[in-house]
Amino acid sequence: MTYYIDNSDVVKIFTSKIQIEKVKEALNILNKQIEIIIVDEINLSEIKIDENSSENLVINSPEKEDTALILYTSGTTGKPKGVMLTFDNIWANVGSLDVYKMYEETDVFLALLPMHHILPLLGTGIMPLLYSATIVFLEDISSAALIDAMKKYKVTMMIGVPKLWEVMHKKIMDTINSKRITRFIFKLAKMVNSLSFSKLIFKKVSEGFGGHIKFFVSGGSKLNPEITKDFYTLGIKICEGYGMTETSPIISYTPKNNIVFDSAGKVIKDVEVKIADDNEILVKGRNVMKGYYKNPEATAEIIDKDGWLHTGDLGKLVNDYLYITGRKKEMIVLSNGKNINPIEIETKISSMTNLISEIVITEYNSILTAVIHPDLEKVKDEKIDNIYENLKWEVVDKYNQKAPDYKKILDVKIINEDFPKTKIGKIRRFMITDMLDGKIEKQERKPEPDFEEYNKIKKYLIDIKGKDVYFDSHIEIDLGMDSLDMVEFQYFLDLNYGIKEENLISKYPTLLELANYIKDNRNQERIGNLDWKEILNKDTSAKLPSSSFIAVFFKFLSFIVFKNIFLELK
């Protein structure tokens, strides 16, 4: 806030009671005196206009090239830049969207996204007001409050970022996949490919969103086309758009009656788009910003002498429909000169399994690396004990078998935390290396639990891995437990607590979860050090999941090798 106030040269600040202290703190740091108006305290009924005085009725009429807004881009690197949008910029986008007839007076819009971003400001602010439609704001943005509002106010349209649709999609598909009959019906609807048929058989899904939704709108970043297809199969349209703050914001938009999956929509009226020789998307039109506030150098870098704005995105145009294929600055240039589009590989690998929550392809230690954040709920449901082995051999290795040599993944890193992101959910790729190197500060941890089982298991894990172990450490991912480690650990639990349950780690993946389970279910305790000779002479049914060939292979190999060693020692 301090940077925005200082950089924008504001003369008045409109704020709420909730934010007033932050505003005062920022002004104190800047040592500035600026008039503050608290909107909560404005009483419109007290504002009186003398109708007999023409002076009071004069309304300032700005020129179309005057700056209407300065919106700061969060960006993925560097300081935010103030995007100057003129009245004509905004009006150009309004006129272009009017062609689609997507707004009506009877519509009810649910405003979820913050209005300091141009997409929600235009889509759920300016446009609905222009058409005298209704806007619903939420104080509580929990999923329960969202659904209640959609039902109560009969919401017809909502704009969201891909993460919102991903969360909704996961919840719906988990319910569908939980029963054989619903799985069959969904597959049938996908084959029929009729929106009216889907609306009929999946009426309950529509009613779950209030029963009045015409369509959803997705923007901010690329939406997985499989999610768009699945929602369509459920009888709900998602119209995807593409743009940026610098273009006020819309460049292309998907007409509700002509959805093309995997496309970012049709280039809108009065906007020119061309694809440069290096496949970068270039834009020209009335919607292109005036420039960056007090930053002519940055303006010259993004808008060339011919007036083309360089988006930094890579794409292609097919019959006026725009397809986004990657981000120019995110391209990986290998030492052999080959260019790698990480998004292309990420999309391919993600489509091969439902166990991946997020994936980033990056160059780490000079080799092409897949950094994967698994969907731990899915891992738990499928009773997978060794996530690394499963993803490496069942997913990445199968991808590598068909990929060109320069696109092969040579290393896999599994992490147990979200990737660093901007406020609108874009991954800060430049921070991934620091994340892997452990340079990103993490939130302060809660106090450690203190009970016998927890302390003993923690000490064991520290001894075998030589790493710091915390109550929320994921036993496999955070500690890097391989197949042999897992075999030894399961025997440790058997010998000390009489716990021989299969898939134990997939059910209780963190140290605290496992320790609590052991405390409540221990059968016996055996004091002493772990002895491999005793383990291999002991008749036990403990085993790794049969779903992982490598895990079973290593268990068998370790048995043969160590059995022979101990026979020689006898």
Image: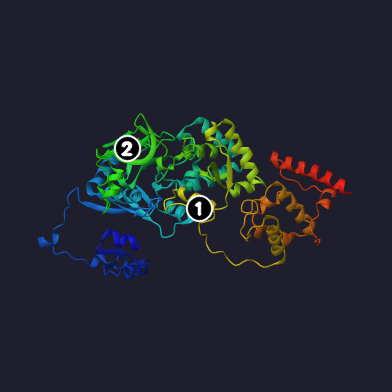
Most extreme residue toward the front is 335
Residue found 10% across the figure and 63% down from its top? 53
Three-letter code, disc 2: Leu
On screen, 321 above or below 55? Answer: above
In x, y percent, where is residue 536? 82, 48
Residue on which disc 1 sits:
434
x and y percentages locating residue 464 in the rendered image: 70, 56
Quote the CA–CA distance across marks 2 and 1. Answer: 32 Å
**Seen from this angle, which residue lies furthest top?**
319
Relative height, residue 319 to residue 231 (above, below): above
Q: Residue 35: x and y, percent?
A: 25, 68
Judging depth in this view, the residue of 390 and 232 nearest the camera is 390
The residue at 52%/59% (across/down) is: 442
- The front one of 56 and 372 is 372
| Residue 83 against residue 395 in the figure, above or below | below
- Give the residue at mark 2: 282
Q: On the picture, is 39 further left or further right than 49?
A: right
Task: Of the two numbered discs 2 and 1 on the same chain, state the one appearing first in sequence.
Answer: 2
Q: Let me know if residue 539 appears in the view.
A: no
